[in-house]
Amino acid sequence: MTPGLVVLVLSLLLGIQPITTDLYLPALPSLTEGFAATVSQAQLTLTTLLLSFGISQLFWGPMSDRFGRRPILLWGLGAYTLASIGCALASSMPLLIVWRTVQGAAMGAAVMGARAIVRDLYTPEAGARAMSKGLTGLGVIACLCAPLGGLLADLLGWRYALAAPGVFGALALALVALRFDESLAARNPRALRPATLLATWLAIVRHPTFLTYSALSTASYAGLFTFLASSSFVFIKVLGLSRTQYGLVMFSMSFVFILGTFMCRRLLPRYGVRRSVAIAGALTLAGGTLLGVLAWAGLHNGWAIMLPYYLFMLGHGVHQPCGQSGAVGPFPRAAGAASALNGFLMMIAAFVMGGWIGIRLDGSVFALTNGVWFWSVCIAVLAWTVVQRYGEPARS
């Protein structure tokens, strides 16, 4: 496969996550009203999806080490496309939650596969640069998600916002089926044996580099998810933006994330992984602290949230490629399992935050601002301590 094709495949596989989580956000208040549901029930369409997404990777990862990346991607993307159709046709909120759970489990195959492919094809530091390119593609896709979701919800109705991921899943499935060559050089026939699986997982979770980078990527994703899970209610219900205007807000956030991935590729050759993460940690802490202080000072408007969060998203564009590739880096022969555990930890944090946000959306901005502020402090502490001690990825 050419480098350009690899980046395209990574972009689509990673981009399936914002397609699934971001595109329907502008329609979330409308579908909540359409099903006569509560806000906490609506949050379950996101939190149960992420929980199944995280847990499913624990199965997809070892399966991909055993059977290869390509068949797992084909199975996962096929199931994802069917589940998206089920979401669009759901007749009740409980049924929508069920289909979203299936959708999340299928999505796990794609995102886990992308991280494993990076380790199959690249050394750890080169993998961070390759991952940043794939995440740039994710950012481009994310830029389009919220505006498209807002337009679909405004012009055609919220069911079309739920149907759109099915089109994306079908396109990704076609690309993998027609152009993707197996990236795993040697399958592990023992990967699914219970004793082997247990030994592999124990070796991974005991490795300080895995724990360091998984903590970094988990905290950074939790800060992002806090914004995603609360922003549609805050911007639309509290601050009075239209769904289309909210889509533009999300577009701007994704655009800044893209800038962060470009910044990552500029920092890595000059400073290396650890110093790059430390620099990004300063941006993250500045953004989260400013966001929290402005909210407590009574400045409750769109710009008082957006401008500080731009700093957080710049840092996120560095922390995610370094964190995701760094966590998998020490395990070239178990990249699927390591990727799965890394993804599982991120989704557990998101699930917990989703439950916290669901009971604290009280008609104010504080669920969003306090949550992001908390995670920005966590990220900075990790970036300046354990990453500096254990964070240099293996060179093999």
Image (tube, rainbow, N blue to C red):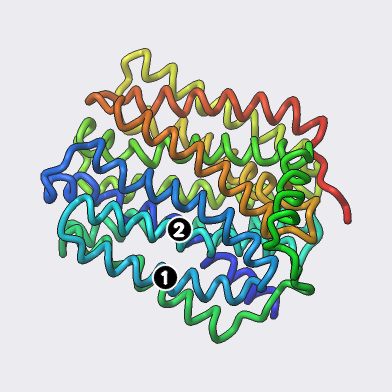
Question: Looking at the image, which is closer to me, 160 or 292?
Answer: 160
Question: Looking at the image, which is closer to me, 122 or 268?
Answer: 122
Image quadrant in which the C terminus is located: bottom right
Q: Residues within 10 Å of mark 1 (few under 14, many from 20)?
A: many
Badge 2 is on which residue?
A: 105
**Could you tell me which residue is drawn at 75 percent across and 65 percent down?**
190
**Could you tell me which residue is drawn at 60 percent across and 31 percent down?**
283
Residue 245: give x, y in percent of width and height: 26, 47
Instruction: Judge whether residue 292 can be spotted in this image.
Output: yes
**Type of residue at label 2?**
Ala
Determine the image quadrant of residue 158: bottom left
Task: Tell me the number on the disc at residue 79.
Answer: 1
Where 381 falls versus 49 (above or below)? above
Q: Residue furthest bottom?
A: 178
Q: Would you say 183 lies left or right of 239 here? A: right
**Type of residue at label 1?**
Ala
Image quadrant in which the N terminus is located: bottom right
Distance between the alpha carbons at the discs numbered 1 and 2: 9 Å
First along the sequence among labels 1 and 2: 1
**Could you tell me which residue is drawn at 13 percent across and 45 percent down?**
33
Q: Residues within 10 Å of mark 2 (few under 14, many from 20)?
A: many
Q: Would you say 74 lies left or right of 361 here? A: right
Proximity of marks 1 and 2: CB atoms separated by less than 8 Å: yes
Where 169 falls versus 53 (above or below)? below
Residue 38: give x, y in percent of width and height: 18, 37
Where 219 falls versus 258 (above or below)? above
Q: Secondary structure at mark 2?
A: helix
